[in-house]
Amino acid sequence: MELTSGYLWFKALHIAFMVTWFAGLFYLPRLFIYHSEAEDDLSRDRFNVMERRLFIIMTIGAVLTAIFGLLLLWINQALLQQGWFHVKVALLAGMFVYHLRCNRWIALLKSGRIPDNTRWLRWFNEIPVLFLLGIVCLAVVKPF
């Protein structure tokens, strides 16, 4: 199947919005750590606003990534026959769960339920790296 120039535009936009989404996934958990370590109400209020705004931006990035990804899939349905693509979709499902978990942390921190220890948040902050490496390596190398 010959892919159209529209396919390449959709692919470029898919990648651009994926970068937006990942920027949020990388930075938002770091804000959770700073928020948890803040000692005054003014700082915590500021983090509430920053977290909410960043979540909105990264959600827009996630939705547009999904839309352009579905357009790519619609044009090139042969992807559904590729093993690597199935693993990529599984990783994407994990990313959506992670995204929703970020929203849960926003709600917890806004309600004043601050963790005593930020060790878990520091580990949580590293999870998007695994998604990024897995997805990019699968999409570029197509190992199986």
Image (cartoon, grey):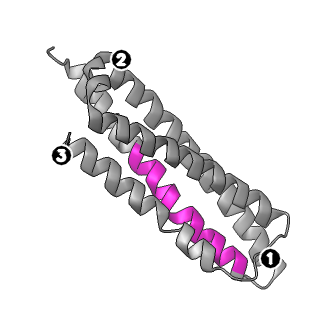
Q: Where is residue 131 in the image (x, y as percent from the top left)?
A: 41, 54
Residue 1: within the magenta? no
Residue assigned mark 3: 141
For this rendering, which residue is in front, 70 or 34? 70
Q: Quadrant of residue 36?
A: bottom right
Residue at position x 54%, y 72% in the image:
123
The answer to whether residue 57 is above or below residue 74 is below
Mark sitting earlier along the chain (1/2): 1
Disc 1 versus disc 2: nearer the observer: 2
Residue assigned mark 2: 74
Q: Where is residue 49 in the image (x, y as percent from the top left)?
A: 72, 61
Instruction: Find the distance from the CA under tag 3 to the CA under tag 1.
Output: 48 Å
Dominant secondary structure, magenta: helix
Would you say the residues marked 3 and 1 are in contact, meaning their CB atoms lie under 8 Å apart? no
Query: Disc 1 residue type?
Result: Leu
For this rendering, which residue is in front, 74 or 83? 83
Query: Disc 3 residue type?
Result: Val
For this rendering, which residue is in front, 46 or 32? 32
Region rendered in magenta: 18-36
Q: Position of residue 73 (x, y in %)?
A: 34, 23
